[in-house]
Image: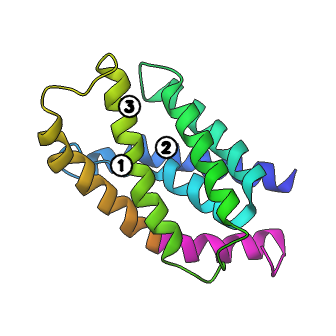
């Protein structure tokens, strides 16, 4: 129950920051996906089960509150959490660069998948322009935030859950 309440509060704060503060602080169409960052980090820290549950919950909230097409983000974030969780046994928690690399990759995959599905099973007409102006910069910003948040969340979860081996 302690983990579930922590995850709920963290996902809710990520949603709140993503939809309010960050949309005004960062110019242009680049808004970091804090929910994706949290899902990937949770998978790496806590394993596939928690990654799957947090990914599904975060994606569902994003589908409900941010997008028109319900389902894309739920499915993608669920997969990203699960996949990150599978890697949690293969990567040392002290490896602070691996999760941000996955965040970078998953940001690009999410962008490509949503654009492909939104355009009626094809890419939009200004696809290359969107890649250069939105996808790559947003992926890079998410990567940098992953570098900052991963060690921070490892410490917070160790303190909150009282587990040295998280």
How crowded pointer 3 is (Cα within 10 Å; few <14, some 14-19, many 20+) is rated as some
Which label's residue is closer to the chain start, 2 or 1? 2
- Find out whether the residues at labels 3 and 2 contact each other: C-beta distance under 8 Å: no
Q: Is residue 29 left or right of residue 161?
A: left
Q: CA distance from mark 2 to mark 1?
A: 22 Å
Element under disc 2 = helix
Q: Is residue 40 left or right of residue 5?
A: left
Q: Is residue 73 above or below residue 40?
A: above
Considering every residue shown, the one lying at the far right of the view is: 1
> Residue 59: image x %, image y %?
56, 36
> Residue 123: image x %, image y %?
25, 28
Q: Which residue is mark 3?
A: 114
Q: Which residues are magenta?
A: 148-166
Q: CA distance from mark 3 to mark 2?
A: 22 Å
Query: Magenta stretch: residue 158 in it?
Result: yes
Q: CA distance from mark 1 to mark 3?
A: 10 Å
Q: Is residue 14 left or right of residue 83?
A: left
Quadrant of res 92 = bottom right
49 or 8, nearer to the observer? 49
Element under disc 1 = helix
Quadrant of res 6 = bottom right
Using the image, tell me which numbered label, if any, was put on residue 15: none
127 or 149, nearer to the observer? 127
Q: Is residue 162 above or below residue 141?
A: below
Element under disc 3 = helix
| Residue at left offset 73%, top offset 69% | 89
Q: Which residue is mark 2?
A: 16
Q: Is residue 12 left or right of residue 16?
A: right
Q: Which residue is mark 1?
A: 108
């Amino acid at each position: 129950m302690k983990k579930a309440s922590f995850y709920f509060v963290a996902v809710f704060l990520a949603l709140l920051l993503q939809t309010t503060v960050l949309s005004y602080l960062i110019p242009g169409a680049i808004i970091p996906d804090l929910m994706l960052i949290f899902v990937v980090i949770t998978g790496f820290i806590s394993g596939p089960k928690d990654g799957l549950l947090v990914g599904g919950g975060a994606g569902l909230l994003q589908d409900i509150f941010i997008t028109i097409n319900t389902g894309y983000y739920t499915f993608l974030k669920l997969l990203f959490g699960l996949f990150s969780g599978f890697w949690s046994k293969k990567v040392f928690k002290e490896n602070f660069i691996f999760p941000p690399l996955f965040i970078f990759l998953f940001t690009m995959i999410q962008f490509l998948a949503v654009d492909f599905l939104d355009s009626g099973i094809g890419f939009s007409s200004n696809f290359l322009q969107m890649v250069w102006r939105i996808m790559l910069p947003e992926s890079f910003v998410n990567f940098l935030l992953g570098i900052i948040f991963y060690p921070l969340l490892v410490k917070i979860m160790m303190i909150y859950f009282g587990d040295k081996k998280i």
